Image: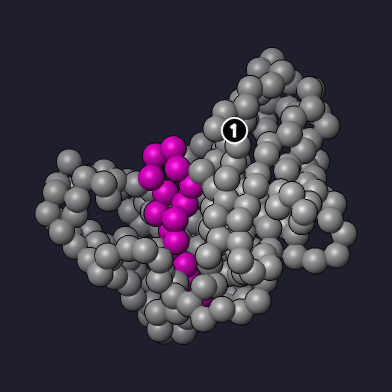
Amino acid sequence: ETGVTQSPTHLIKTRGQQVTLRCSSQSGHNTVSWYQQALGQGPQFIFQYYREEENGRGNFPPRFSGLQFPNYSSELNVNALELDDSALYLCASSLRSGARTGELFFGEGSRLTVL
Amino acid sequence: AQSVTQLDSQVPVFEEAPVELRCNYSSSVSVYLFWYVQYPNQGLQLLLKYLSGSTLVKGINGFEAEFNKSQTSFHLRKPSVHISDTAEYFCAVSPSTYIQGAQKLVFGQGTRLTINP
């Protein structure tokens, strides 16, 4: 039990739709990182938020966007869904330095299927 | 930039046998190294990490790993596995110094460890 909760756990969308995934971070953590894990692959870094500001972004198009709220919870939004967006989306909370020193606490993920 | 290669996508072993999961990395800067485990339908859990100091690091559940800088490797070992070790294992790296916008982990593709009775 990491104290990081993600919702929804599973969802199905059709191509072209939009989706919002939510993450509540562990108490005391001010940084949230989002990762995409395609089937049979390792997680890939999407972006990170620190104190409500984007603090780094991976190689994902602008239709992937995010927010962090004053309570440090976070949202990941994906517009114009494509079939290749089907994946497990993982949220990880940490202190700022923890994102680099491995002190990341992962949620169980939101599994998105795009038809 | 960093990259991680896990040399085996699947490793089947018998219960109580030893196991080694291999990981090699590439980086233009010094790195921290990690192994994470993912049990079915769960998120990732940190097994162990190398930040500095002794190159042999011990983690949870009896796992250990050795950092070899000359071979850019960080192989994971356990002397005797149990059925409960069945999971996906991921090797990851991050830069050891602060780089703006790069506070992230770069993961390998994973090794599925299957323990047979």
* Residue A19 appears left or right of B53: left
Q: State the residue at coordinates (36%, 57%).
A: A7
Residue at (27% x, 50% y) in the render: A85
Kind of element beneath mark 1: loop
Q: Is residue A7 above or below residue A42?
A: below
**Residue B5 % position (x, y):** 57, 45
Tell me which colouring the rendered structure shows: one colour
Between residue B73 and residue A20, name the one nearer to us: B73
Magenta-drawn segment: A24-45
Residue designated by label 1: B8
In front of the other: A64 or A19: A64
Quadrant of the frame with the C terminus of chain A: top left
Q: Quadrant of residue A91?
A: bottom left
Instruction: Give the residue drawn at x 40%, y 71%.
Output: A57
Q: Tell me residue A44's x, y (percent).
A: 44, 56
Would you say residue A71 is visible in this rendering? no
> Is residue A31 highlighted in magenta?
yes
Please state the horizontal and vertical placement of residue A48, each as a whole percent of the image. 44, 72
